[in-house]
């Protein structure tokens, strides 16, 4: 992909809004449709909150997340989220059971499910001690919205 | 996020504005918890002013509903808009909760 912007943030909740704002303004500058910007905000929040809460030991001063955005050869908007925390393959997570009644439903696991539903493509790789999640999304509104 | 509260019959109506995300969901959950502590059991969440909800908000809703269930309490919803409606659908919340078009419809059903 052609990288347009790359930034590092401390991996904690205070970074959530600044990092979302940074990617959203990058997407807007690339002409991504408003509905899809909404999909990006939600998916990115889910990924970042997972990194903030689970990737690193609590209070690790080196806890960092690196976010890059750009455009793929096919013209899609692409976001990469990378951390050096414990390995976590979001693609290996099973989908939560959605039709159970309230008492039986699991409280967790919905975030990744939302990401997979809202993005056009989700990739994961573990390389050189890094988790890297790649999100791909078309710039036009979805037809089924 | 802003929440305003109003009592209608035996039901607490919460009008939630803005965003329920990982930053604001603890306050949202705490508001509900303190009402439950005061003995409230039936809640209508009027989400007509809610523009965004992430899984952190869904988690707060589900854990509150789980807490209410054994006490015979429940959560109802009304006024879901665009992205919030879609997130409810994708997460299956549309089928486990009672969701109404308007606040009036929800109150009539009580």
Image: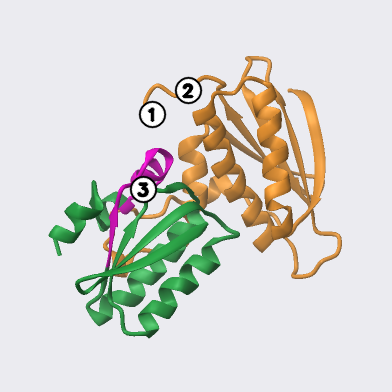
Chain colours: A orange, B green
**Disc 1 marks which residue?**
A145
| Residue B74 image point, x, y percent | 26, 69
Residue A110 visible in the snapshot? yes
Whether residue B86 appears in magenta in the rendering, the answer is yes
Residue at 54% across, 44% down: A42
Badge 2: chain ID: A
Q: Distance from label 2 to label 1 (Cα)?
A: 8 Å
**Residue B10 sits in which quadrant?**
bottom left
Q: Does any portion of residue A120 appear in the rendered image?
A: no
Height in image: A3 above or below B106?
A: above
Contact flag, marks 2 and 1 (Cβ < 8 Å) = yes
Residue B53 in percent (x, y) is at 47, 50
SS of the residue at dot 1?
Answer: loop
Which label number is shown at residue A94?
none
Q: Residue furthest right?
A: A62
Let me know if residue A76 is in the magenta part.
Answer: no
């Amino acid at each position: 992909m052609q990288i347009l912007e790359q930034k590092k943030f401390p991996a904690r909740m205070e970074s959530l809004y600044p990092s979302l704002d940074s990617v959203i303004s990058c997407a807007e500058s690339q002409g991504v449709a408003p509905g899809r910007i909404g999909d990006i905000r939600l998916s990115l929040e889910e990924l970042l909150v997972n990194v903030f809460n689970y990737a690193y030991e609590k209070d690790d001063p080196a806890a960092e997340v690196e976010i890059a955005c750009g455009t793929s050869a096919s013209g899609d908007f692409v976001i990469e989220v990378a951390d050096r925390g414990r390995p976590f393959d979001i693609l290996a997570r099973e989908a939560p059971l959605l039709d159970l009644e309230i008492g039986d439903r699991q409280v967790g696991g919905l975030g990744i499910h939302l990401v997979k539903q809202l993005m056009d493509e989700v990739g994961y790789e573990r390389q050189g001690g890094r988790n890297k999640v790649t999100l791909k999304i078309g710039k036009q509104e979805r037809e089924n919205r | 996020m802003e929440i305003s509260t109003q009592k209608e019959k035996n039901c607490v109506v919460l009008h939630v504005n803005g965003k329920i995300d990982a930053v604001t969901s603890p306050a949202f959950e705490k508001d509900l918890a303190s009402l439950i502590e005061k003995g409230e059991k039936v809640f209508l969440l009027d989400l007509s002013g809610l523009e965004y909800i992430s899984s952190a908000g869904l988690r707060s809703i589900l854990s509150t509903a789980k807490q209410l269930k054994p006490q015979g309490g429940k959560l109802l919803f009304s006024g879901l808009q665009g992205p919030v409606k879609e997130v409810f659908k994708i997460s299956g919340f549309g089928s486990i909760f009672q969701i109404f078009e308007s606040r009036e419809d929800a109150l009539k059903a009580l």
